[in-house]
Image: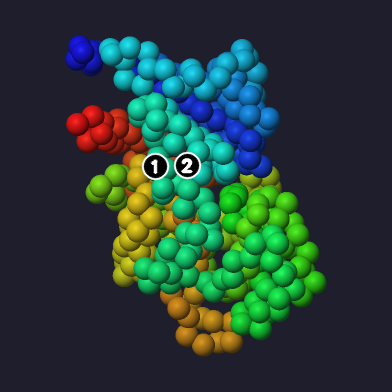
Amino acid sequence: MSQPNRNLKTRVIVLFGGESAEHDVSCVTAAHVLRALDAEKYSVTTIGITRRGEWIHAELPTSPDIKSLQIKGTSTNSDLVLKNLDDETQLVVFPLLHGPMGEDGTVQGMLELAHVAYVGSGVLSSAVAMDKSVAKQVLAANGIDQQKFLVVRANDDHSQFADQAIREFGLPLFVKPANMGSSIGVQKAKSREGVLSALQIAFEFDEWALIEEAIVGREIEVALLGNEDPRASLPGEIIPSREFYDYEDKYLVDGAKLLVPAPLSAKETEQVRQLALRIYKTLRAEGMARVDFFYEEKRRDGGAGRGFLCNEINTIPGFTPISMYPKLWQASGLSYPQLLDELISLAIARQAKRRNKTSR
């Protein structure tokens, strides 16, 4: 086999869209990633997945002002991604598929079987992080503080779990699908009837749901980058414009305030960064992730707060102009194009390491 020609551009396949309810968010993310990829370094192919699961060799955007990609072009299939071009070209897939059927280890497993380098976490970490109920149980087993929660399955006795949650956590409560992101399907319930109604909504998206205690606290986020030796960004803080940081606040009304870096003391900043790294390593994340926290300074009853509580981890965080992940790295000294370069380099390095082990 010949040695790769380092003068050739790296071939990057940007994979976006997908079958989940986060399809639109993925299209917006992909448009901005494409705009920032250096044409001198990368030869880019754009593959869109429709809501019905069709793979489309998508047309590249022609306007610099485009806000999201439209999936239209020539029909193709996953074989295009699975086929390496030749020994002279380095191929990297950049999956920007938020939610199930993309962020949950499914696409990652396909790429592993094809021995193709890809950006982001592997199969195990992607699957565990996507399922918030499993991630929370793994983190709890490792002594990481979180808000109190119950895991409910669609065929469970909803009334029993609602009563238990109200008895143990009090009202209000948050109810969410276990396998979903972008706050889709998340409801704040202020009564028993509200909890039962919220569970019905959550089960429209997933077979599993979470009932969580409501935390009175600040929302802090940390971006992570790296494989074996990851590093954490400066933390940022989100101040929602609505009752909580829901889908509309994230993507439609653009009313939330993003404080980057977060107004924390040096001690608090270092504490949350180290905790984010611990969570990243515990869940075996690679490439990139964003870890979201609540900072509970006081409890609802006025008692001393529990400090930083892990809310969730996202292994394919958003890259839109208002997304925290690129903003946090920019505040930490890494520009958007530099961030993309490093993510692609991390994908190549990880693939080389894995191939060295599996080819023996």
The Cα–Cα distance between marks 1 and 2, rounded to whole angstroms, is 7 Å
Residue 26 location in percent, x, y? 58, 36
Specify whether residue 292 is in view: no
> Residue at point 63% right, 29% down?
53
Looking at the image, which residue is at 41% across and 47% down? 124
Q: Provide the residue designation for mark 2.
A: 105
Residue at image coords 52%, 22%: 78
Q: Is residue 49 above or below residue 247?
A: above
Quarter of the picture containing the C terminus is top left
Q: Which mark is residue 100?
A: none
Residue drawn at the location 48% of the way across and 17% of the way down:
80
Question: Looking at the image, is 140 positioned above or below residue 245?
Answer: below
Residue 2 screen position, x and y as percent: 20, 11
User: Is 101 displayed left or right of 163 in the figure?
Assistant: left
Please rate how many residues cluster around mark 1, counting C-alpha atoms within 10 Å: few if below 14, some from 14 to 19, many from 20.
Answer: many
Cβ atoms at labels 1 and 2 below 8 Å apart = yes
Query: In which quadrant will I find the N terminus?
Result: top left
The residue labelled by disc 1 is 122
- Pick the residue in front: 195 or 323: 195
Q: Position of residue 347 (x, y in %)?
A: 33, 34
Q: Is residue 295 left or right of residue 10?
A: right
Please rate how many residues cluster around mark 2, counting C-alpha atoms within 10 Å: few if below 14, some from 14 to 19, many from 20.
Answer: many
Task: Name the secondary structure under disc 1.
Answer: loop
Q: Amino acid at mark 2?
A: Gly
Give the percent coordinates (x, y) of residue 278: 33, 61
Q: Nearer the viewer, residue 153 or 200?
A: 153
